[in-house]
Image (tube, grey):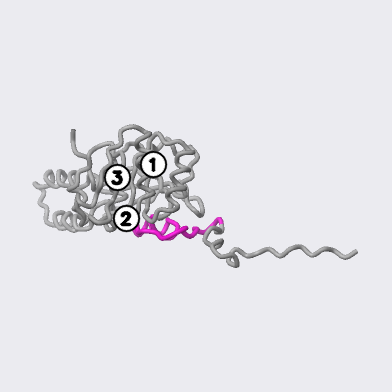
Amino acid sequence: MQATPLPQRTAPEAVPGMAAQVWRGNQLGSAQGRVCPSGFKTLDTELPGGGWPCCAITEVLQPQCSAAEWRLLLPGLAALATPQRPLLVVGAPQQPYFGGLRLYGASEQCVVLVCAQTPAQQLWATEQALKTEGLAAVVAWLPHARAEQIRRLQACASRCLAPAFLLRPQATQFESSAAPLRVQIRLGGMHTLAVHILKRRGPMHEGWITLNALPPHLVDVLSRQSAHAEPEQEGAGAVLDGAVGRPALAVASA
């Protein structure tokens, strides 16, 4: 009796488009579309494709909203935003301080704020934004979004040419999510931000990445001031450090 030959397996690279969706477990996968640099080279080396993905949702989780998200996002997004191609912000819990945006070379004309109050309004506005062309990026606060709602937003984002970020509570890290990329952030030491990648196309990320969260020109200012500071001026220097060390797009005081 003659044995029937087994069908040959097709290598992923032999099927158009499949190679981008298959990766080894110990290697970073490639991005499904183009990526945008985050503004932090150390972070980009840990992100599939080397930056924030377009055509996909990125979830940013943190213990307290409006504490660190702008430190993470502004270095990359400010370079993309223009008055003709603005950054769209949905449901920000507090009014942003646009002076921080100017530190990165952008202006308030580069931002469109959508004041969505209820969870339903926030979801609707975010979905419409993901379906809109001509945006630099979409940043939305969705603390109450459910897994099926994020799955729907991810489907919309797959056809969006801009990066999209959902800001959510840290407690949601244990919930399932259709977002291909999930990062957890927290404030670090002096002027630093700590980032842990919870989910990505590739191996599990261990530990935390420490990022310098100051605008580049302020790093030079502080370095010069530190070099010329006299002992009796140490108190004034500490005040300055505290002022410039706030989130790049700090919230206005009530």
Number of the front mark, 3 or 2: 2
Magenta segment main secondary structure = loop
Number of residue marks? 3
Number of the front mark, 1 or 3: 3
Q: Residues within 10 Å of mark 2 (few under 14, many from 20)?
A: some
- Asked which quadrant contains residue 34, the reply is bottom left
Q: Tell me where the magenta segment starts and ends, as one range.
A: 25-52
- Residue at label 3? 89
Q: Residues within 10 Å of mark 3 (few under 14, many from 20)?
A: many
Secondary structure found at label 1: strand
Secondary structure found at label 2: loop
Identified by mark 2, the residue type is Gly
Residue 239: x and y in percent read 15, 43
Q: Is residue 187 left or right of residue 232?
A: right
Task: Check the picture and name the quadrant holding the C terminus.
Answer: top left
- Residue at label 2? 134
Identified by mark 3, the residue type is Val
Q: Residue at x 17, y 54 (%)?
A: 222
Measure the C-alpha gap from mark 3 to mark 2: 14 Å
Residue 61 bears which disc, if any?
1
Residue at the extreme bottom of the image, as rendered: 14
